Image: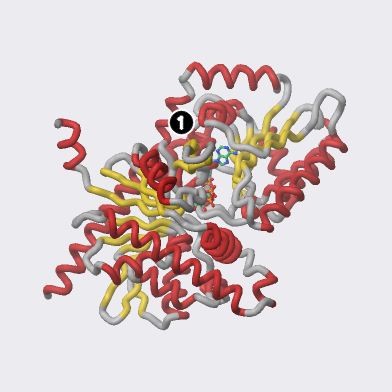
């Protein structure tokens, strides 16, 4: 009874995101194994504890039959997750197509895919139709589970059509939408054939949030320039209806990382790693194997460093842990072979019978292994070509209280705005600059490392995921009360 009362006193929060915190992997007929999902969105939202939260999202697997769907829904229910079932064709057109081949590259300034520029508008249109259909299916599930007073928090570029779908069904629903990627300059956004419809649907939300002030400003510019609406200091106004727009920089659950470092299994991993790389400095890259992470550029910069600094050749190693992601999208397949080719070439060039300069793993690490790696490495290399925030940089800082390693960070990651003073900021496209920053980081005196680390650590422990979510939800509540007062006046 007591536990239930406690729950009841918390505000109910429906988190709606394409990706659930666990993804189902089929094991036999109607049995699944639930695996932790990888990505910044999941990391951030798992740090949110203050609410009575339910997740609604795609199960990550195709389950065509009703019996199977019921079985999986039951397994997910134990994790407070509610699945949205999407058939294979919808996933292909919505997730692989419109989300990850069109919106994702466009929002990261890579542009629209060539083939779509040349192809008939039909293929683009059919992907957008699938996107809208998928968003409607998410709305159906939200409606089914919604209770009056719930806060419905929609996430990311997969669900830009969702605020409109929800408000059309129930105008009283409290709806927020948060984007985990950059929102690009309005000149980039206007290339999108469905630019008007997407902006209008997002504006149906009561509160729209971004990681940085720049992304929020780009979104407001898109609304004023492309839709011709009026921007106000609070957001965007359309025929008397105000949509609040603001920046809410995400963080991590820093305590979870700091505490993990004390665990015996993490300490054991640390010991093994230290022995394995004794006598050498270790640089670390942890990324989804994604075109925005600048992995080839990072590896080429490391090659240049080795080329120019022969004295370092057997004394430094780069560990690049790149978990495969969105593997059905051709661009991602190309990237994988490109990275493998470069790594092979450099290891062939600079390796010896006993050691290679680059260890590249195509896999994800479990939490304990990851914490150990963060803690024992000397330098982290985050070279995203664009990145909404980048939480890997936060995680590295959280685990470096004793070693005080150096963070080399792309100026094109949202995190550059918060960790810029402590990190070495680089332009990832400038291989010469990144190579010389590697040298600078490896030679940095202890007092400078300590000062830089201290600056970043203070930020990471005081801007947590919990605080991010609490601020967003309280702002959403306030926005709604203010809107009610305005309509009464
Ligand atoms: P994104 O959301 O684009 O993936 P972020 O850096 O914000 O980028 O978040 C990535 C999250 O995924 C982090 O929490 C990180 O720990 C996790 N992650 C990324 N790559 C790996 C990997 N190879 N193994 C384990 N976790 C990973
Ligand atoms: O944080 C950015 C993000 O795109 C999330 O939206 C997503 O969950 C994550 O990266 C991983 O990608 P995916 O869900 O496509 O596996």
Pick the residue in front: 16 or 71. 71
Across and down, in percent, residue 204 comes to 33, 70
As displayed, is residue 327 above or below residue 1?
below
Across and down, in percent, residue 326 comes to 60, 52
As displayed, is residue 123 above or below residue 278?
below
Q: How is the image coloured?
A: secondary structure
As displayed, is residue 442 above or below residue 479?
above
In the image, what residue occupies the spot 52% across and 27% down?
A: 368
Across and down, in percent, residue 261 comes to 48, 24
- What residue sits right under mark 1 in the picture? 257
Quadrant of the rendered structure where residue 221 is? bottom left
Q: Residues within 10 Å of mark 1 (few under 14, many from 20)?
A: many
In the image, what residue occupies the spot 55% across and 62% down?
A: 89
Horizontal side, residue 83 vs residue 241: left or right: right
In the image, what residue occupies the spot 36% across and 71% down?
A: 203
Quadrant of the rendered structure where residue 306 is? top right
Confirm whether residue 227 shows in the render: yes
Q: Quadrant of ligand 1?
A: top right
Q: Is mark 1 within 8 Å of ligand 1?
A: no
Confirm whether residue 108 shows in the render: no
Quadrant in which the N terminus appears: top left
In the image, what residue occupies the spot 22% across and 63% down?
A: 480
Quadrant in which the C terminus appears: bottom left
């Amino acid at each position: 009874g007591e536990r239930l009362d406690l729950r009841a006193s918390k505000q109910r929060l429906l988190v709606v995101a394409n990706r659930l915190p666990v993804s189902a992997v089929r094991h036999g007929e109607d049995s699944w194994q639930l695996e932790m999902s990888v990505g910044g969105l999941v990391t951030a939202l798992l740090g949110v504890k203050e609410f009575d939260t339910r997740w609604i999202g795609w199960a990550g697997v195709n389950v065509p039959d009703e019996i199977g769907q019921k079985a999986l829904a039951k397994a997910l229910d134990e994790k407070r997750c509610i699945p949205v079932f999407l058939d294979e064709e919808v996933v292909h057109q919505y997730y692989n197509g419109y989300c990850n081949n069109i919106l994702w590259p466009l929002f990261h300034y890579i542009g629209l895919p060539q083939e779509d520029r040349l192809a008939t508008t039909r293929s683009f249109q059919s992907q957008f139709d699938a996107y809208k259909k998928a968003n409607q299916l998410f709305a159906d599930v939200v409606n089914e589970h919604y209770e009056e007073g719930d806060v419905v928090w929609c996430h990311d570029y997969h669900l830009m059509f969702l605020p409109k779908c929800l408000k059309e069904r129930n105008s009283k629903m409290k709806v927020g939408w948060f984007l985990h990627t950059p929102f690009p300059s309005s000149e980039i956004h206007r290339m999108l054939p469905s630019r008007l419809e997407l902006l209008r649907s997002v504006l149906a939300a009561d509160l729209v949030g971004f990681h940085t002030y720049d992304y929020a400003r780009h979104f407001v510019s898109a609304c004023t320039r492309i839709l011709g609406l009026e921007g106000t200091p609070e957001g965007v106004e359309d025929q008397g209806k105000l949509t609040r727009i603001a920046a809410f920089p995400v963080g991590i659950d820093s305590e979870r990382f700091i505490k993990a470092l004390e665990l015996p299994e993490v300490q054991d991993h640390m010991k093994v790693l230290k022995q394995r790389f004794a006598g050498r400095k270790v640089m670390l890259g942890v990324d989804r194997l994604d075109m925005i992470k600048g992995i080839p550029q990072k590896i080429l910069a490391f090659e240049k460093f080795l080329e120019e600094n022969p004295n370092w050749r057997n004394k430094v190693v780069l560990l690049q842990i790149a978990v495969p992601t969105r593997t059905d999208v051709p661009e991602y397949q190309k990237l994988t072979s490109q990275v493998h080719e470069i790594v092979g070439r450099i290891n062939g060039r600079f390796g010896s019978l006993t050691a290679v300069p680059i260890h590249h793993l195509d896999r994800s690490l479990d939490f304990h292994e990851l914490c150990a790696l963060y803690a024992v490495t000397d330098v982290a290399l985050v070279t995203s070509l664009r990145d909404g925030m980048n939480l890997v940089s936060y995680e590295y800082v959280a685990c470096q209280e004793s070693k005080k390693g150096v963070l080399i960070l792309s100026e094109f990651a949202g995190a550059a705005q918060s960790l810029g003073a402590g990190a070495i900021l680089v332009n990832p496209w400038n291989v010469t600059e990144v190579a010389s920053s590697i040298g600078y980081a490896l030679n940095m005196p202890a007092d400078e490392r300590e000062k830089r680390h201290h600056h970043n650590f203070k930020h990471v422990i005081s801007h947590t995921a919990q605080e991010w979510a609490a601020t967003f939800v309280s702002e959403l509540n306030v926005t709604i009360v203010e809107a009610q007062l305005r309509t009464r006046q």
